[in-house]
Structures are given as C-alpha cells and as structure tokens.
Image (cartoon, grey):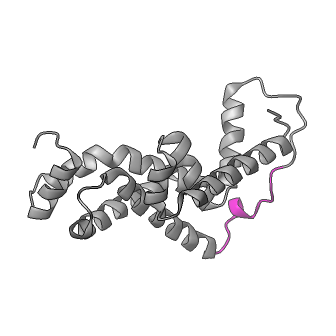
Amino acid sequence: MTLMDDRALVDALRIGDPLAPRELIDRFHGVVFGLCFRMMRHRQDAEDVAQETFLRALRAIDGFDGSRPLRPWLLGIAANRCRTALGRKVRRPLTVERTVADDPVDHRAGVSDPNDLATELERALDRLRPEYRVVFTLFHEQGLPYEEIGVALDRPVGTVKTWLHRARSELAACLARRGLEP
C-alpha cells in the first residue's frame, strides 16, 4: 500500500483492505503513543492504551466522518482511553510510590543542569489533572491548534483555552514552589 491521504485510508479501512490497518498504525503510532506515554507516565500502560486506541478506532471507523482529519479523532480516542485508565488507577490501592506526599520545596537558587529542569517539569506535569495534562500535551508537544484539540476531546475551544491556561498556571506555581522561578 502506498502512502495515502486520510480519506483514502478511511475508505480502504471500510472496504476491508488487509493492509489498511497497518498503514493507520504506522502513520499515527508515534503521536498516539506519545500522548499515551505523557498521560500514563509508564511505558507499558501507554502501550496498552495505544493498542486499545487503535482497536477502538478500527471498530468505529464506519461511523467516522471521512471528510475530517484522522489525527484529532485518534488523539481524542487516546485521550479518553487514558482518562479511563487513569481513573482505574486512582481506584486501585495505593502503592508505596503513590503514598509519598508532595515533594519538599527545593530551596536552591536555580537549576543549572538542564536535565534537572526537565525532571522538575516532568514532576510538575505529573501533578496536573488529566484533562489539563492532555490539553497541554496536545498543544505544546503535538502542536495541535485549539480547534483540533476541541475536536479531539469533544470540548468547546473556550474550554480548551481555559484548561491550557490552568495547566500553565499550575505548572508555574508548582515550579515556583520547587524554587524554579521563571
């Protein structure tokens, strides 16, 4: 199968082309897995959710509006699957890792090692509500515009903007508490 546009891929999936599912996965695995990994924070959990995303997409392809782009639709499925999986995790008994209280304030004057800054940012992202984290990830890491994020999450653009603003504010506050002022 040659590289095809979204509409042709949807048509191929609908008629049962045996190579079409592989094309879908090859084309979108990176962005779907990237979102799942950012949301789930664990490689195996992200792999499971990404796989479930593609299975759900393949089952629901007949109901997909083929005139629309596939990427926001797939990312929406992935985001919903991540939220569901995270909800199940919250209801599980706490492990030793999850019972640790918020990290203590870091009173260093600043962080000179960029790897430390990356670690601090990851720690702050982990503390965001899942819906804030997904919007932040879709906007800043996946480069989706507000409108596509709204489509992916089935939320109005105003909600997307609000969640992104809150995510940024919470990240800034968390980093400031850790001694990292902008």
The answer to whether 49 appears left or right of 158 in the picture is: left
Frontmost residue, 24 versus 10: 10
Percent position of residue 55, x then y: 29, 65
Does 94 sit above or below residue 177?
Answer: below
Q: Main secondary structure of the magenta part?
A: loop
Instruction: Determine if residue 127 is in view.
Output: yes
Does 79 sit above or below residue 139?
Answer: below
Instruction: Determine if residue 41 is in view.
Output: no
The answer to whether 23 appears left or right of 107 in the picture is: left
Q: Quadrant of residue 97?
A: bottom right
Question: Which part of the image, by quadrant, shows the N terminus?
Answer: top left
Percent position of residue 3, x then y: 17, 39
Frontmost residue, 97 versus 13: 13
Question: Which part of the image, by quadrant, shows the C terminus?
Answer: top right
Q: Is residue 95 magenta?
A: yes
Residue at 67%, 56% in the rendered image: 128
Percent position of residue 43, x then y: 48, 51
Frontmost residue, 45 versus 14: 14
The answer to whether 146 appears left or right of 17 in the picture is: right
Q: Is residue 92 magenta?
A: no
- Magenta part of the chain: 93-103
Residue at 44%, 58% in the rendered image: 152
Percent position of residue 136, x then y: 59, 48
